[in-house]
Image (cartoon, rainbow, N blue to C red):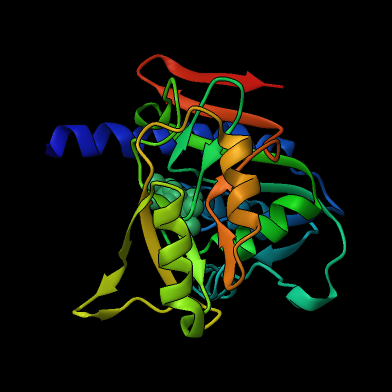
């Protein structure tokens, strides 16, 4: 197990080194959340340290704290209308660039940032590549008042929802909401499922990130493999 974790960390780092090559001075840069994005943020901090002029947008409070500790200048999220390049991770991706995200619970800001981004670069280790999405349970952010309503609607779509917990209490997102992790089995038609989920009142956002990635850079034992649209 330890060896496996070392390998995936190495793959994430390789992918992040490749990804930061897309960042140029003057750009607005989206910073992802998670252990893969962590490597990219370290690389970006080194670029800033060496004089590169960028402004960054953080996809979570955790990432915002990390970026400011490392001296990366941050924009106020509310002011952002367009982002040049974002580097973020994924929980699963397919070779045609569809993804599940939200394992870290940051999916709401990650999806807004991805939607505003011209070039969304996903970095991943080789365990994230799948034939079909859905082995990883789908994270869904829910406004707490609507929890039971949303659970009923998700069960009507044949999903098995589990409220995410942290030290025994419900996990609370940066936006003050709950996460439910939903087992839909393998997802045959992600666009149809996304459409149905988008119609549930009280469901703020789900972790299907469809047609949002421009490129996935995956680390593997030989170096990196790039998946493009
Ligand atoms: C957080 C995310 C992450 O990108 C995803 O969970 C992957 O994390 P990691 O890079 O640690 O494997 O979507 O909401």
Name the image quarter holding the C terminus: top right
Could you say where residue 167 lies in the image, as x and y percent from the top left?
20, 78
Residue 203, picture quadrant: bottom right
Q: Position of residue 217 (x, y in %)?
A: 56, 28
- Locate residue 117 relative to residue 194 in the image: left or right: right
Along the horizontal axis of the image, is 56 left or right of 132? right
User: Looking at this rendering, what residue extends furthest in the top direction?
Assistant: 222
Q: Quadrant of the N terminus?
A: top left
50 relative to 22, above or below: below
Q: How many marks?
A: 0
Looking at this view, is 197 or 117 the one in front? Answer: 197
- Picture quadrant where residue 70 is located: bottom right
Q: Is residue 82 at all visible to an observer of this figure? A: yes
Q: Residue at x 74, y 74 (%)?
A: 77
| Above or below 199: residue 75 | below
Name of the residue lying farthest toward the front: 156
Seen in the picture, residue 204 relative to 89 is either above or below; the reply is below
Q: Residue at position x 40%, y 36% from top?
A: 134
Kindly identify the residue that appears in the image at 79 percent across and 77 percent down: 78
The one nearer the camera, 75 or 141, is 141
Residue 34 appears in the rendering: no
Viewer-nearest residue: 98 or 15: 98
Q: Which is more toward the observer, 84 or 200? A: 200
């Amino acid at each position: 197990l330890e060896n496996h974790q070392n390998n995936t960390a190495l793959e994430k780092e390789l992918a992040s080194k490749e990804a930061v090559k897309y960042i140029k001075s003057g750009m607005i840069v989206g910073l992802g959340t998670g252990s893969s994005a962590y490597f990219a943020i370290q690389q970006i901090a080194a670029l800033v340290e060496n004089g590169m002029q960028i402004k960054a947008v953080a996809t979570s409070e955790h990432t915002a704290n990390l970026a400011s500790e490392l001296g990366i200048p941050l924009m106020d999220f509310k002011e952002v209308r367009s982002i040049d390049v974002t580097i973020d991770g994924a929980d699963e991706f397919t070779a045609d660039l569809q993804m599940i995200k939200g394992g870290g619970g940051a999916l709401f800001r990650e999806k807004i940032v991805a939607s505003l981004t011209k070039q969304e670069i996903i970095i991943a280790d080789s365990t994230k590549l799948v034939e079909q999405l859905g082995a990883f349970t789908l994270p869904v952010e829910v406004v707490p008042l609507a929890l039971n309503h949303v659970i009923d609607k998700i069960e009507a779509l044949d999903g098995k929802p589990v409220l995410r917990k942290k030290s025994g209490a419900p996990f609370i997102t940066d936006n003050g909401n709950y996460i439910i992790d939903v087992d839909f089995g393998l997802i045959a038609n992600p666009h149809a499922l996304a459409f149905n989920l988008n119609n549930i009142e009280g469901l703020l956002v789900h972790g299907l990130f469809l047609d949002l990635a421009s490129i996935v850079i995956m680390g593997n034992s030989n170096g990196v493999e790039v998946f493009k649209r």
